[in-house]
Image (spheres, rainbow, N blue to C red):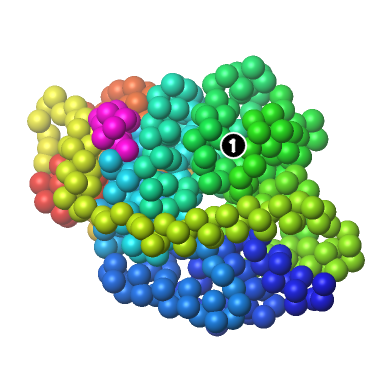
Amino acid sequence: MNEQEARQTLGQIFALRFPRSWDSLDLNRFPVANYIIFRDALEPTFEASRDRIRDARTMLRARGIEPVFMMDEEGGRVTQISGFFPSAPSPRAVAKVLSPDQAADLYAELGAYLGQLGIDVNLAPCLDVNTESLNPIIGTRAFASDTATVTRFGERAIGALRRSISCVAKHFPGHGMTKLDSHLTLPFVDDPRETLQAVHMAPFKDAVRWCADGIMVSHCLYRALEVESLPASLSTQIVRDHLRINLGYDGLVFTDSLDMKPVTQSFNPRDAAVRAFEATCDILLYTDISERFESAFETLVDMLLMGKINKDHLTRSVARRRRIFERSNVIQEFKPLFDRSEYCSLADAVRDSCVRVDDARGLLPLAPADAVVLSTSSQAAERIRRTVPTVEEIGDRRSDLPGPAGKTLIVWLAEPLTVRHSLEALRSMIRTAGRSVLVTSYDAVATSLAECDVKIVTDDLSPQTEDSIVKRLFGAPA
């Protein structure tokens, strides 16, 4: 095998962010075949976005690269297509409002739409069981806090999506019990092995039976499963022993993004890539075209050329990825048509039922000029169209923050929740405000901040629901 053949082979086990400009990626040096499409790579319309994806596929094929295009389209706050399409509601809201059969219909239509856009793989659904009430990263992304509901709705979501595209269940062996955000730091999980297996790993065990096309592994440290203090994504004990051997899974295994801080803070890019590959992960995922990615790619090229790589696993990884590619080609020939009216009817039914308002004093709607807004959601701030300090700034007791005295204080606590250290600071500000309004997706926070005059609790954080909440606050878009 010469160097270019090595690069072409290894390009099939790396995944990169779909670039806004292909000039930013040297395809001769890094012939990557898998791309994650985020909203910044899409155009303002479905048609223009579809054409851009189609043109990229044509360009890559002309260079001898057979691409697989992926998207992170869970619904709720994890959506890429909301600029031109009403995203699906959060999984939690779906499971609370719809029957499993109705949920299957919703996800079937979502899959059909993504397939027509040109997407091959959806990095969804989450099969996490959200047992931590203040989970900072999963929350409404999970169908429920009990295993039975997650399993029931996960099965229907996977079956429905697979009618039109492939799908990836995540985040094995479970991220629903964590108290930290794995984008920011390494969460430690101290649940015993029995709890992990019976509660958190059970939906993934069933996902193997449901023929999930891929399973994504988390960046959490599970002390009961891993003796080397490695995040699951880099752990041979978790990926090879628990997922592949114990659960019998022979599909694609994805790392979560190797650009996330649990990896970058503790591992150099070469070690991270080698550990993930040796753990039997098949797709090494990077959300940036970065020096870390380039270093990881070059490391595996050198190892392959020197015969220091597990060629059997590489062959299996390429074959697993090939199955996804071939399945996508078959589906494209027989893809179901998207029924917009069916989809919107189901999505609207969820959104109409997912927001609960406690306004005993009848304070809504508010006058925008009379409100001071504090938010963890930049999207919410944009919707309200005002400068919004963050809750972290409140926790730091910044002296230049707008004071709520005599005004209505709106506290908009969206996911991910990063306010544990700030709740007392928030209470202090709430006490000095003339009136206070809380918007949250966390029932536990609504209970903790009971002194708020108005409480709006939502199970959905999709852009459409956030727009609806703004209308409830002000009577019309502010």
* Range drawn in magenta: 94-104
Residue 106 occupies quadrant = top left
Q: Pinpoint residue 263: horizontal percent, then vertical percent.
A: 68, 49
Instruction: Name the image quarter holding residue 82.
Output: bottom left
* 95 magenta-colored: yes
Q: Is residue 244 left or right of residue 46?
A: right
Find numbered disc 1 in the image and state the secondary structure of the residue it sits on: strand
Label 1 packing within 10 angstroms: few (<14), some (14-19), many (20+): many
* Residue at x 54%, y 21% (from the top left corner): 199
The type of residue carrying mark 1 is Phe
The residue indicated by pointer 1 is 172
Is residue 12 visible from the viewing direction of this image? yes
Question: Who's the residue at 21% across and 30% down the image?
Answer: 356
> What residue is at 69 percent from the left and 71 percent from the top?
8
Total labels: the figure holds 1
Location of residue 172 (image quadrant): top right
Vertical arrangement, residue 355 with respect to residue 316, above or below: above
Left or right of 187 in this view: 346: left
The reply, left or right, for residue 193 in relation to residue 395 is: right
Most frequent secondary structure within the magenta stretch: helix
Residue 285 position in % (x across, y down): 61, 56
